[in-house]
Image (spheres, rainbow, N blue to C red):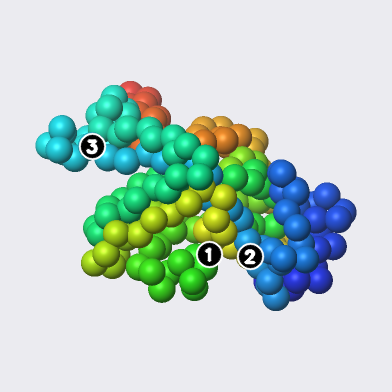
Amino acid sequence: MILSDRDIRAAILRGDIRVTPPINLETHLGSCSIDFHLGNTFMVFEHSRYPHIDPRQQQSIGDSMRTIVVPEGEAFIMQAGDFALASTVESLELPDNLLGRLEGRSSIARLGITVHSTAAVFEPGWVGTATMELSNLGRMAVALYPGMRICSFTFQQLTSSVDVPYRAKRGAKYAGQDIPRASLLSEEEQSLRKVESVNGHVS
C-alpha cells in the first residue's frame, strides 16, 4: 500500500517519518510523494586516470573517485554521458514498518537526467541522506544547482514491522550517511569470502 498525501502528512506529524531539516509540506508534498533537494557535494569518477575499477578492492573504488563541493550560487555541470554521486539536503528516518522509494521528478527527467540507476528502495529503519546515482542520458550538458528540488520519495506500508531494521543490520554500510559515499561493494565481497572460507574449513 502506497501512502497518500494525507497519510504522509500524518506520519510526519506523528514522527514516524522524520525529515531533517523539516520540509514545507504546503509546497513540497504531492498527492503521494514528498520532494527532496539536491545537496552541494558530488563524487565523480576520474576515468582518465584509472583504466578500470576493481569492486574487490576498496582502494580502487575510492581512488578512482573525486569529491567536488559546489560553492553557494554555482552549478554542477553534468556533461552528456556523465555519471555522478550526489546526496539530498534532507536526512530521512523511516520506522520499522515503512519503506521509502526514491523517484525521479518528471521536470528533471525531461532534461535527460536520471537520479538513480537501480538503487531506489530505502529499507525500513533507514536513517541518513539519500545518495543518488545521477546520469545525463541526453546529448546536452545540464546545470544542476544545489538546493533545487531533485527527487521525490514515496512510502509503502509493510504487512508488519521488520525483525531487523536497516539501521540495526550487521554490515549496514550506508546507515547514517550525510554526504554521498562511494560504493562499499568490496566490504561485502570480503565478508562473503570470509564466510565461504569458514564454511569450507568446517566442512
Residue 50 spot, x, y in % from top left: 16, 33
Mark number, residue 103: 1
Marks 3 and 2, how far apart in space?
33 Å
User: Are dots 1 and 2 in contact, CB under 8 Å?
Assistant: yes
Tell me the kind of residue under disc 3.
Answer: Glu
Judge the density around disc 1: few (<14), some (14-19), many (≥20) Cα neighbours within 10 Å. some
Q: Quadrant of the C terminus?
A: top left
In this picture, is 185 found above or below 161?
A: above
User: Which element type, helix, strand or loop, lies under badge 2?
Assistant: strand
Which residue shows up at 38% across the image and 33% down it? Answer: 67
Tell me the kind of residue under disc 1.
Answer: Glu
Mark earlier in primary sequence (1, 3): 3
Most extreme residue toward the left, as rendered?
Answer: 51
Report the front residue among 129 and 141: 141
Mark number, residue 46: 3
Marks 1 and 3, how far apart in space?
27 Å
Report the front residue among 101 and 139: 139
Marks 1 and 2, how far apart in space?
7 Å
